[in-house]
Amino acid sequence: MNPWLHRIVSAVISLLLILQGGSALHINDSRTAEGSFLPGAVWNDTEGEPIQAHGGQVQYMPVPDGKGGQTCMYVWVGENKTGGHTGNPVAVYTSEDLYHWTCRGDVLRPLDSLDQIDSDPYFSKLYGDCTAEEKQHIYDCIGTHMVIERPKMLYNAASGRYVIWFHNDGPTEKNSYYYDIGMAGLAVSDSPFGPFRFEGRFRLSECPGGQIDCYPSSKGEARDMNLFADEDGTGYIVYTSENNKTIYISRLNEDYTGLSGSEYGVDYIRIFPGAMREAPVLCKAEGRYYLMTSSTTGWGSNQARVWSAEAIFGRWRNDGNPCIGRGRSVTFDTQSTTLFQAPDGGWIYGGDRWKGEDLADSRYVWLPAAFEDGRLTIRWEDEWKWEE
Ligand code: GAL
């Protein structure tokens, strides 16, 4: 977003927050979370360092047990924003109880320079066998000058490998704006703890003939995104396209490294054309699919909206704003990024409270979520525990 527009949007949002009591949601900012959820407070990992996993995803998934086998743990993957806006490494944390998180390091690393591929053994091992042209392309995609945002991970049981899809962006010759490329990046590894090898960046599904494309000059764009694996193992990528105007859901191929095909209604659908939604989160609860989204106001928060459907490529119903109580009109000053289940089966909403002027100090806001009578609700708590 352009800096002036960003300032105006932030001012309007602050005003909205004050008008409807949302400023009270920031009361706990200076506390440190440990052993309970303190939405918006500093959240340190088990080494005492602030967790860096923004725009991320939490899920219970298989991880190596260190003895050659597998065990299941909560895995939190997200953007390490200590370096600022661009070139964010993808970081991974693990936890047994959802309160205490152990840092597993940066599992997908950006390149400081093209030379680093040959001079740094970490990168030579991953990309040393590439041609000069391929190396240049890798640097052009995941150099520290490029956008690496909203990374999400899936474990593919058939291949035994882990994939990370992320929003890969940057300026073009035509436009110096950070988000002119609008592509989906892919990285693959044998372990959730990396190293992940960057495999390329892609445009995704395109508006089919006979439908109104809200941005026909740039086909197949993919920006804010999320991943979802259904109970039968089918993988999906959900993303904002058509210059952030339309959300798409596309089915992934068997090993989750590409799309399943290009047939509309079979391999993908576009939903809410022109609705201007982003930050999508897709999940399934009690047999129904839910898609939570934000509006498009950069780092500023806005009102969430949920759609739900009986079938993933079926008819999606507008369920409106899932937030209830104080702060509901600006999603409790957050932007959606994940929805997952605690060990007791209760749902947790995870949102980012972005700090545009100091992105590394952006906070996490986790709140209790519930699915009742086909509706998602999310409510504010100053402090809470999933097991209470
Ligand atoms: C938001 C998006 C973030 C980031 C930001 C940059 O709309 O959800 O992931 O791209 O814009 O302004």
Image (cartoon, rainbow, N blue to C red):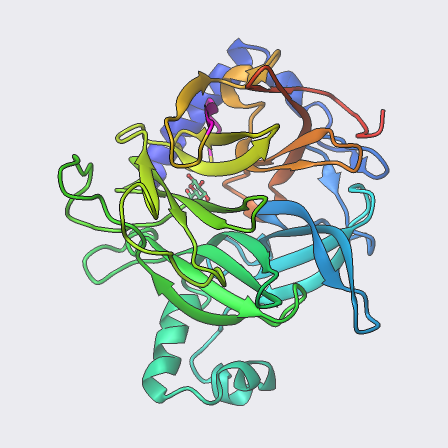
Magenta part of the chain? 300-310
Residue 304 painted magenta:
yes
In the image, taking residue 174 as reference, residue 361 lies left or right, namely right
Give residue 309's quadrant in the image: top left
In the image, taking residue 8 as reference, residue 245 lies left or right, namely left
The residue shown at (29%, 35%) is 245
Q: Is residue 12 above or below residue 64?
A: above
Give residue 62's quadrant in the image: bottom right
Q: Pick the residue in front: 55 or 11.
A: 55
Total numbered labels: 0
Q: Is residue 308 above or below residue 145?
A: above
Image location (x, y in percent) of residue 363: 64, 38
Q: Is residue 171 visible?
A: yes
State the quadrant of the N terminus: top left
Give residue 296's quadrant in the image: top left
The residue shown at (46%, 66%) is 144
Residue 92 painted magenta:
no
Q: Is residue 291 above or below residue 45?
A: above
Q: Is residue 2 visible?
A: no
The residue shown at (55%, 44%) is 230
Image location (x, y in percent) of residue 101: 78, 50
